[in-house]
Amino acid sequence: MIELRPYEQLGGAHHGWLETRHHFSFAEYYDPARMHWGRLRVWNDDIIAAQSGFPPHPHRDMEIITYVRSGAITHVDNLGNQGRTVAGDVQVMSAGTGITHGEYNLEDQETRLFQIWIMPDQKGLPPSWGTRQFPRGDRAGAFVTLASGIDGDEDEALRIHADARVAAATLNRGQATEYFMASGRRVYMVPARGRIEVNGVTANAGDGLAIRDERLLRVSAGEDSEIVLVDVA
């Protein structure tokens, strides 16, 4: 089963400095049919204006992954962490018992990113933050794991406290790759740019694909494309 969720039909909001679309119920957008996808709770597509950002605010008991599509984001938190994550790279914040952080676009151009929240396997863990470079060239033509809590995944992936995997791939026009889904898993896939076809279903940049009861996903690119997915129980 593959359900296409077009970008234009997603929930969203405009706050002047922030334009956002919500793949799942979030803030003032509520859809009882789109509360979560397995342990995936939030997938927001954010455009943050230059020299603006999210002021300090708290989180707890959530794994929060930020995938920067263009521009850069600068993170600061009450644990003393600070770092800048640029386009194509990833940061992970495990909120655990509680963390207060700000996310700022200190660039002279807008920043576009995916913010992904995954429910942890265990509550009350120590909070933490980390970021990693994942050059787009290293994932050309195949999916590479960016963050994971699944045993056996690549050691270089950022670790999260959830039975979940975040992966990405870049495909040139006409190129194809495959992704295997284990029994009982769910995948949510979004092309960050370009146009793709997954087992006969076409998705454009920003569209969501909610996938279950499939085993082999064949992903082909109708345009040069960048693809992000979350694989969850």
Image (cartoon, grey):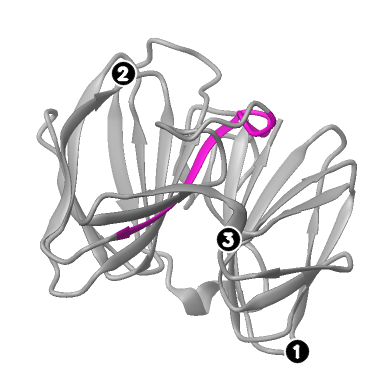
Furthest toward the bottom, the residue is: 173
Dot 2 or dot 1: first in sequence order is 2
Q: Which amino acid does label 3 sit on?
A: Glu
> Residue shown at 58%/70% (left/top)?
205
**In the displayed structure, does residue 104 sit left or right of residue 94?**
left
Residue pointed to by mark 3 = 8
* Residue segment shown in magenta: 33-47
Closest to the camera, between mark 3 and mark 2, is 3
Q: The residue tagged with tag 3: helix, strand or loop?
A: helix
Q: Any magenta on residue 35?
A: yes
**In the displayed structure, does residue 176 sit left or right of residue 120?**
right
Please tell me the numbered disc located at residue 174. Answer: 1
Q: Quadrant of the C terminus?
A: top right
**In the displayed structure, does residue 59 sit left or right of residue 6?**
left
Closest to the camera, between mark 1 and mark 3, is 3
Q: Nearer the viewer, residue 4 or 188?
A: 4
Residue 101, percent across and down?
Answer: 19, 34
Within 10 Å of disc 2 (Cα), the crowding (few <14, some 14-19, many 20+) is few
